Image (cartoon, rainbow, N blue to C red):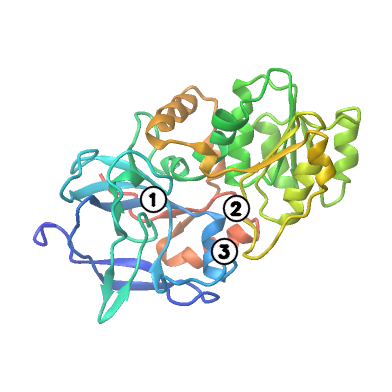
Amino acid sequence: MNKDSYPSHMKAAVLWETGEPLSIEDNIEIPDLKTGQVLVKMAFSGVCKSQFMEVSGARGKDKFLPHLLGHEGCGKVMSIGTGVSKVSKGDWVILGWIKGIGKNAEGAKYKLGKKIINSGAVTTFSTYTIVSENRLVSLPPGIPKDVAVLFGCALPTGAGILLNEIKPKKGSTIAFIGLGGIGLSSLMTTKIYNCKNVIAIDVSQKKLDLAKKFGATHTINSSNENTLDRINHITNGVGVDYSVEAAGSTETIELAFELVKKNGGRCVFASHPEAGKKISLDPFQLILGKNIKGSWGGKSKPDRDTPILADLYNKGLMPLEALLTKKYTLDEINIALDDLNNSNVFRPLIVIDETLK
């Protein structure tokens, strides 16, 4: 990296200890790029529930402390390391956690005084970031730079569950439990499959109302309705063909499995409950032909799927702006995390440099 062209230091949110708020540090040294690494100036970052879990300690012991966070964002390439051929200086890119084409570079090690701050292959809660080449894709035409953050995690995971895993049959019934960024991204993808019944389930009426706008034919507020009774009524006691769980608890995963029909019903869960939590299933239901599996990023391949998702957005089939309900500065990252955890927002948008050209 040319130190005469780019700042030698950056601002970032640092996790020093789990269970403590992120600390905003202004004088973190940017190291030289290694093979396969790319320096990106950040414009926007999204916030995923998994970041709250990391900060709170719900993911268990963190052996990488202190470290940076964030895995979905949009920014501009400022410099590339040796061996990088996928992107060039000046390119606008989407940053995401799912591996794509390109070199799989190690995470950068930053310095704050004498302290080393670790990072993974991608981090986004900072003014600059060093990213592995294979965690970047070029920003497709027509995609706003703020909306692009959703292409780094929520959208490829949620939409990918339908596009790459379930592939619902025409006239089928599908239920969605948990209407955050992943759940709603998955639900809106049903538009291209002509499902008969699209059932949205959550404890938030605000989220259920939005799901209705996105194509839900039925909504169930599980805080005051019996979900299983409603599903039995809608399906005449048969159960749903498919269920997608994105609420984040063992109880909702178990419920999603319970809702699917015998002889071929499929439950896919994308959430990550707290470390150490186990799900409990009736094995006889598996014998009767119910299926359950976890999803790793919706089996998405960023270089293949990003243009497909961009096309759906550009055709008006994915109103993604509705998910970005509130903007925050980088200094307000802890407020954003709390708002996300308390379901006050669908997906926080961290505005780092919206004037970046």
Could one spot residue 203 in this view of the protein?
no
Answer with mark 2 or mark 1, whichever residue precedes in sequence: 1
Q: Residue at x 75, y 21 (%)?
A: 196
In terms of secondary structure, where does tag 3 sit?
A: helix
Q: Residues within 10 Å of mark 2 (few under 14, many from 20)?
A: many
Q: Which residue is mark 3?
A: 53
Answer with mark 1 or mark 3, whichever residue precedes in sequence: 1
Q: Which residue is mark 2?
A: 345
Could one spot residue 51 in this view of the protein?
yes
Question: Which of the two residues, 214 or 304, is positioned nearer the viewer here?
Answer: 304
The amino acid type, in three-letter code, at marker 3 is: Met
Q: Which residue is mark 1?
A: 44
Q: Residue at x 70, y 46 (%)?
A: 206
Question: Which of the two residues, 316 or 239, is positioned nearer the viewer here?
Answer: 239
The amino acid type, in three-letter code, at marker 2 is: Val
C-alpha span from label 2 to label 1: 17 Å
Q: Residues within 10 Å of mark 3 (few under 14, many from 20)?
A: many
In terms of secondary structure, where does tag 2 sit?
A: loop
